[in-house]
Image (cartoon, helix red, strand yellow):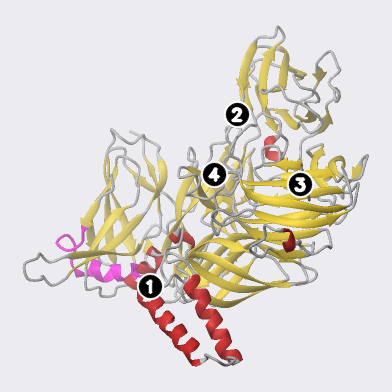
Amino acid sequence: MSGTVTSTGRCPGRALRLLAALAACSAAVAAQAAAPRIGYAYPAGLARGSSVEIVVGGRALGGVSAARISGADVQAEVLGHERPLTGAERETLRQELQKLLQTQAGRTPSPADAARIAELRRKLATPRQPPSPQIAETVRLRITAGPDAEPTVRDLRLRTPAGWTNPIRFRIGTLSEYRETEPNQAADTAVPTGLPLLVNGQILPGDVDRFWIRARKGARLVVVVSARELIPYLADAVPGWFQAVVSVSDARGNLLAFADDHRFDPDPVLHCDLPADGDYVVEVRDALWRGREDFVYRMAIGEVPLVTGVFPLGARAGAEPTVELQGVAVPEGPVALPRLGRTTGVRALPLGERVEPLRAVPFAVDDLPEVREADADGSAAGPQDLQPPVIVNGRIAHPGERDLFRFRGRAGERVVAEVMARRLGSPLDARLRLLDAQGRTLASNDDQEDRGAGWTTHHADPYLAARLPADGTYLVEVLDVQDHGGPEYAYRLRVSPPRHDFALRVVPATLNLRAGATEVFTVHAMRRDGFDEDIRLRLVDPPPGLTLGGAWVPAGSSQARLTLTAPANALDAPLQLVLEGVARIGGKDATRVAVPAENQMQAFAYQHLVPAAELVVAVLGGGRGGAGVRLASGGDAPVRLPAQGKARVPVRGLRRALPAEVRFELSDPPAGIALEGIEATRDGFDLLVTVDGQKVRPGTKGNLIVQAFGERTGPAREGARARTQRFALGTLPAIPFEVGRR
């Protein structure tokens, strides 16, 4: 458990003066306690070359002064902020409205009075109790996208006095856009006749949105709904997102098409051939008949190309691949893609302007040799020979099909087999088996969690690693565990020796620091094929004074808590930072960029690392910057802790008076490591850290996070005891450590 120490009585006033260097001031800490956060934007996008007024809902948004949208050619202007009215405020507005109406009785009000009357009525019409305190406050913005703005999903953030909010997804599109108007359940609420069209809507409690369109006989109508794409997870909802359903009916109410998802994706997609000229109804609602302000959607309607799949699901870096597209009104036959760069990973399929980008289609790029499955139609009788390392682009073409691949191996060799399918948009729920020449199973796997796939809730892609028992022939089997199959059931199978590698996520995607203060954040490491070395972390071109503490993810760890210390003075604009990890792989340094992410909760329980477009760091005023608190070791080399006993960790810094009792605590330390006390030194103090060898393994590595708290005791009231108030002062730079061996 974490150790606690009171500096008074154990350390003279020098330590108290030094601790002032940690304090960003109690007002700043209070602001952090009510951190600003946004939960939705409506509408959640606009067409490039246009401007729109939107509402952003969240909490602690008072004093919002600016908005930030990632990427180029998009600007945002803050128009106003509103929060739920108190009872007294509501009564004041009611009296003002009544007085205005009495004054204007019998005559036409002036434009100013008419505008004020409308505003008062709108404010008084808002619910007394918002459906969720997390989205009770709203901010109005005007967003303008230039004609050359890239059509993609952006990050939208707001700035408040307490700092920048978390990002929310905001899409730039290319179709003409329309915003629903309520009520919209009757035929006289037809949308504009010009299709294709992008409809923006919200599903409120008890709401069903209907849109009347006019189309011609034989038209192939495509409807694509984006809901979970905009807000991936709702913490307080089950299944954890707005589960939209969509249908198309004729004017008489005859159902022509219905969809409540697209394969395993909760966002529905449908297409149908219309039987006659005339009017049709497109209906959207929640599958569970729920509704709330953050049940936001964008729906494309029209005769538009729609890509639902691609084969193969990836290609080798540097190649000029050709692919087959699946979907509606897409080119037939091979489609040539532009030459791929040398960067590996998953990206959006690079189709350019040839096909309307209604949905992002993932496409994998790797640097291993690639082959296509010879048994593309599922008719071959025997296994296909492979020469590892290799990636096979294949598909389960028919229900019940089993794909077999054969390779030669030597005794003691380690082999890895991995399928990428669900992570690349394929509906395949694959299972892998490694067999010997006699058909005996040596290893098998169905599902393997990939913590880097933040959108995935069913980790359906398998992975296995095994050591070969003898020289000889081995088989790898791929099948669908649900006995499904078809042209869309594609996969990429990797068969290779272990390829040590890693990927990083940095959480949260927004960090607000007071000048001179230190904040804690987390880096998650996804280690691959048994890679288990230290990963050193560094900032790319940071501004002077911005320093990283505990800059590593130690060997054997899947995550580490680090600190970021701000420079002495506030910065006018937020920084778009880049964090890198460096590790030794195959005798060389391998560098990987940490992807910013938000740790989002789904359905009250599950946590997901959802990627964001950029890592934003703001350095705000209000701190007591310039103190220069630091570890005597410099913070780069790990502090050596004994396998059993006590160690001193020297802390150095400037001195300022702090009129309060100060306490130190370790934040979430490893079991068996505690903070026993502090001792003053000439230019700072020593942290006294103890290790219980019965609870801590020798060789354990990590970071210690030390936080400082103050206490104030108020005057005693008559008949009551004096109350002691505890408040956070700040955080020391993270202390990397390693427990020695006995």
Q: Amino acid at mark 1?
A: Thr
Q: Amino acid at mark 4?
A: Ala
Q: Residues within 10 Å of mark 1 (few under 14, many from 20)?
A: few
Q: Amino acid at mark 3?
A: Ser
Cα distance in 3D space between marks 1 and 2: 51 Å
In the rendered image, residue 631, in percent from the top left (x then y), is placed at: 37, 60
User: Label 4, on which residue?
Assistant: 525
Q: Amino acid at mark 2?
A: Asp
Residue found farthest to the front:
106
Q: Are marks 3 and 1 in contact (CB under 8 Å)?
A: no
| Residue 687 visible in rendering | yes
Q: Earlier in the sequence, mark 1 or mark 2?
A: 1
| Quadrant for the N terminus in the image | top left
Q: Which range is magenta?
A: 6-24
Residue at x-position 42% and y-position 72%: 85
Label 3 vs label 2, nearer the camera: 3
User: Residue 21 lies in magenta, yes or no?
Assistant: yes
Mark 3: secondary structure = strand
Can you tell which mark lies on residue 86? 1
In the rendered image, residue 83, in percent from the top left (x then y), is placed at: 46, 71
